[in-house]
Amino acid sequence: MSSHDLGPTAAETDHSHGEPLPADRNRVWTALRSNIPAAVGMVILAVLVVVGVLGDLIAPYGVNEVNVDQMLQAPTWSHPFGTDELGRDVLSRVMVAARVSLMVGAVSVGLALLAGVTLGLVAGYYGGIVDNVLMRCMDVLFAFPVLLLAVAIVAVLGPGLVTAMVAIGVVYAPIFARVTRASVLSVREQVFVQAAVSVGASDGRIMRRHVLPNIAAPLIVQTSLSLAFAILSEAALSFLGLGIQPPKPSWGRMLYDGRGFVQDAWWLGLFPGLAIFVTVLAFNVVGDALRDVLDPRQLSQDEARRAS
Amino acid sequence: MSEPVLSIENLSVSFSSRRGVARVVDGVDWEVHPGQTLAVVGESGSGKSMTVLAATGLSPRGAKVGGTVRLRGEDLGAMSEVERRRARGRHVGFVYQDPMTSLNPVMPVGRQVTEASEEHLGLRGDDARSRAVELLDMVGIPSPEQRVDNYPHQFSGGMRQRVVIAMALANDPELLIADEATTALDVTTQAQILELVESLQERLGTAVVWITHDLGVVAGIADQVAVMYGGRILEHGTVDHIFGSPGHPYTQALLAARPQPGVRADRLATIPGAPPVPHQLPPGCAFYPRCPVRGDERCRTEEPPLTEIAPGHRVRTFYRAPHSGIERPAS
């Protein structure tokens, strides 16, 4: 809270001169664009989404176009990322694999967010025995190393795309539950929540309208971080052969396949690895910037910055 | 006299903890009538806020509440949780101490102001918005049509408290409860807020319960005053009773501790000692350890009853020291 709000001279004065704010979306958009790393991150994500959607349409070669004559070629103009041991174009495979990675990231984090936030909200808001039971269950899930748990789930449900998404979703749900619960605990003690109770608002309404919007910032950051980790996890699962099944391309699987050729054909591992790296980084940078921008308490500073 | 809006009979609140049972409110009774203001005064921890919270069914988890509370003649204790919530939302408005924290920082003020109306009167969309504008206008916020979409941090402290008052008045409640509503504000703003509440009260006929430790505020707005100490009422009467002929040594000590305008004193008078800890209340009079009168053995072992010394003026003491003739300050 800015200090001028506290001074006695601020009494009964009007800070923003009554001018209504432009729509929130515009403000967020402007602020994001003026943050250079975030802008770069968004461009990268936009490119990834386009590539992910159009994948096979814009890839220069077919994903499984085997051409043994051309095998293990270093990057050239016709094969910018080189070719693999079967002569398939690495660039095309990386492009098509973007879809899988983004989809796994989005769906699994969506699952984790939905489950984790709901559980964390209920646990934090009601407290007591509800809180204890729910959070101890989350602790059990949390106690397993991420990959071990994901592997166990995949082992039970059988390898494949859907299983991978569910497994990663389950693995990341406890983190969301914890972040949500911790934030809820501090928000529910705030006077405005008490005020909402005093005017007779229902629990559901208080959670939806007062608690949830106030914990959005940590959740957004957690989402962006988890998107990155989910993509990594998918890569790891595929690397272990438990995710996307060949011949479908996936970054993790390509990394796995390329590891035998590190000495002879570095491009097999480098490019899928770079793809993972860039995607994860982009999500992190954008998430970080979103956190700063989405908090309305930052509004005055943003306005001040714009005005100067 | 008309039926009281809120009446409390023999209200008690206690908490059980490892260190024993803490009786934070004990045998409190008072009532407020339409258009009247009751000031509940006392030091921190005297049970004044807890009395009101318990009376409206908002006591914290683990509190054991006893006694009878009637809101508009209806027994709140006999209601279900949902009915109580509805009654509270419909007929009672709350104003809290710190306007910095009593508004949701991520919700435009207009939506917060009409929250109670949405919940209980089914007000939606444009209706809710125009009602919010009307309420903001009523509490004296300039250009309410624009301000209705602003967020709390875009208002100053005084303006925020006006928003909170608008929020409390959204459903035309019969009762307004102000818990230290001006304590966090500077003196000028405080005067403006008091004036606002008084004029609204006159216009709307609302009953007000004003919880405060500021006797200056009490003198300015109250009709009735209840002085609380250690969870009990020590003295209860009209403003003239309390300021003109205070019957309890505690009330007298409180009045003597006020800064007097025009009187230069190096140090303000204080009451030595500290208020009792709720789970270790003295067996007799709660104020005995700090009492300047220091009566006798009876004060130490026996709790004095709340006795009426004049019509409408009740005092809980065995020894009524002759009052020091403190004038009621001009408000």
Image: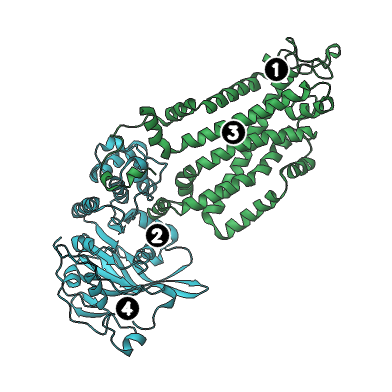
- The residue wearing badge 4 is B290
Q: Position of residue A244 (x, y in %)?
A: 76, 30
Q: Tell me if residue B36 can be seen.
A: no
Under mark 2, the amino acid is: Arg
The residue lying at 63 percent from left, 41 percent from top is: A112
Q: Is residue B328 above or below residue A25?
A: below
Q: Is residue B211 above or below residue A306?
A: below
Disc 3 element = helix
- The residue wearing badge 2 is B84
- The residue wearing badge 3 is A284
On-image quarter of the N terminus of chain B: bottom left
The answer to which of B298 and A110 lies nearer the viewer is B298
User: Of callouts 3 and 1, which one flags the residue occurring earlier in the amino acid sequence?
Assistant: 1
The tint chain A carries is: green
Front position among marks 2 and 4: 4
The answer to whether marks 3 and 4 mark residues whose Cβ atoms lie closer than 8 Å is no
The label number, if any, that marks residue A56 in the structure image: 1
